[in-house]
Amino acid sequence: MELGILVNIFILLSATVVVVYICNFFKIPHLIGYLFTGILLSPKTLNLVEEATEVEAYAEIGVILLLFSVGLEFSFGNLKKIQRYVLLGGFLQVILTIAVSSLLIVLIGRTLNESIFWGFVTCLSSTAIVVKTMQDKFQLNTPHGKVILAMLLFQDIVIVPLMLLTPILAGKGDNPLLEIGMLVVKLAAMVLLAWVLSKFIIPRYFKYIMKLQSQEIFLLSTIVIILGIALFTAQLGLSLALGAFIAGLIVAETDYNKMAISCFVPFRYLFISFFFISMGMLLDYRIFLQHVDLILFWFVFILFVKILAGFLATTALRVSRRTALAVGLSLAQIGEFSFVLSKSGLDVGLISETNYQIFLSVSILTMILTPFILNNLDALLNKFDKAPWIKATN
């Protein structure tokens, strides 16, 4: 039997228990403990975990389970209620972030193509961090929670065209119009398939499964649905996470959604911890020490751009300024899919290895800040309410 995987899991979980215990003692969010665990065990630090790629695989499973659980608790009916937020709000948030970021980066001397690419990676926020934290605080059904989830969903979709456009920015693409047209066709096919599955196939499938009166069979059958839909979306060139979310929406339309939630919550938290550990393992702490001034500059830059873009995009939805500000503050971090996109930019020569590591450092700092923002969101909004230049309107 190959013991390498078991040894890695043992090391990861043991270190995580110690770090999270310390975080709990000092009342620090557990997500920060996961990130620091990854930095500590990284091949560039103590090098205790031999195969970081295995941890990345666990992390991807964690994101899939998280998005599936979000879909479970949301359903197509709820999604239809916020379709305006997804299409208009999500589009405006992405476009404004890319436009503002690109303009400011061009002004400091970077090339246009590189600046646009940095706008791409900046426009994405962390579904894993924001959704988990808001779920823990029961905020997803609040006015700002619905807008935030809608924008995060749009970002999970838009990662696909951004990935297609990245080689084109590097001068290595083919026909962008044809590729975007194919993307639209694929999304339409996915929507049609989801509708057919939710109305005619999955309810009957579960009805047959429940005749067996076995929770084990139900759990395995649900995993088959998740993996099947996620793999299908991946074959279409879309993200696994988007497929998992759609699977959650489909199961939520059945009479067995509460049973599915109870089965998957324990697994979700285990694999989500692996996701944040893997993010920490990517970081080279030596780059952080060598370029601390640049990292702090870009940290402030990203916070400013994302809060501004989120605020403006949400204001266009004609909601209160308090809600708009809550959205801007909540989305002021770099997302997990930005890591995938930045690696693509590194591979095609759009960015250097040093800039890639600086980006990772800045991203992790924004991720570390996010739980503090979300846990103290009401207090922050109340302080802004007292300022005459941002007085909330209801």
Image (cartoon, helix red, strand yellow):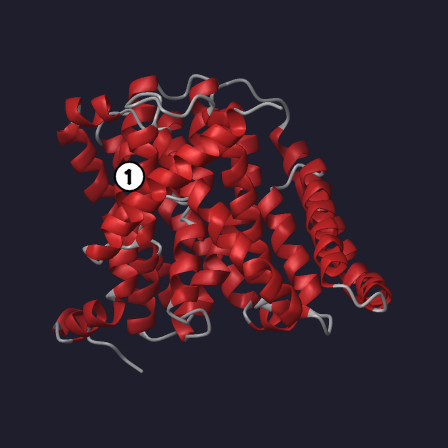
Camera-side residue of 278 and 162? 278
The total of numbered circles placed on residues is 1
Given residues 313 and 191, the one toward you in this image is 191
| Residue at position x 41%, y 74% in the image | 143
Relative to 149, does residue 338 appear above or below in the rendering?
A: above
The answer to which of 9 and 124 lies nearer the viewer is 9
The picture places residue 319, in percent across and down from the top left corner, at 38, 74
How far across and how far down the image is residue 138, in percent?
A: 41, 72
Residue drawn at x 47%, y 29% as measured from the top left: 7
Q: Is residue 372 left or right of residue 142?
A: left
383 and 14: which one is in front?
A: 14
Residue 6 placement (x, y as % from top left):
52, 31
Residue 358, position in %: x, y? 27, 28
Q: In this view, which residue lies farthest toward the front?
A: 1
Horizontal side of residue 359 vs 295, given as left or right: right
For the residue carrying disc 1, how many other residues have a C-alpha within 10 Å: few (<14), some (14-19), or many (20+)? many
Circle 1 sits on which residue? 36
In the rendered image, which quarter contains the C terminus? bottom left
Q: Residue at x 34, y 21 (%)?
A: 47
Name the residue rendered at 81%, 60% in the picture: 196
Q: Is residue 167 visible?
A: yes
Dot 1 amino acid type: Phe
Secondary structure under badge 1? helix
Residue 121 appears in view: no
Q: Is 6 located above or below residue 62 in the figure?
A: above
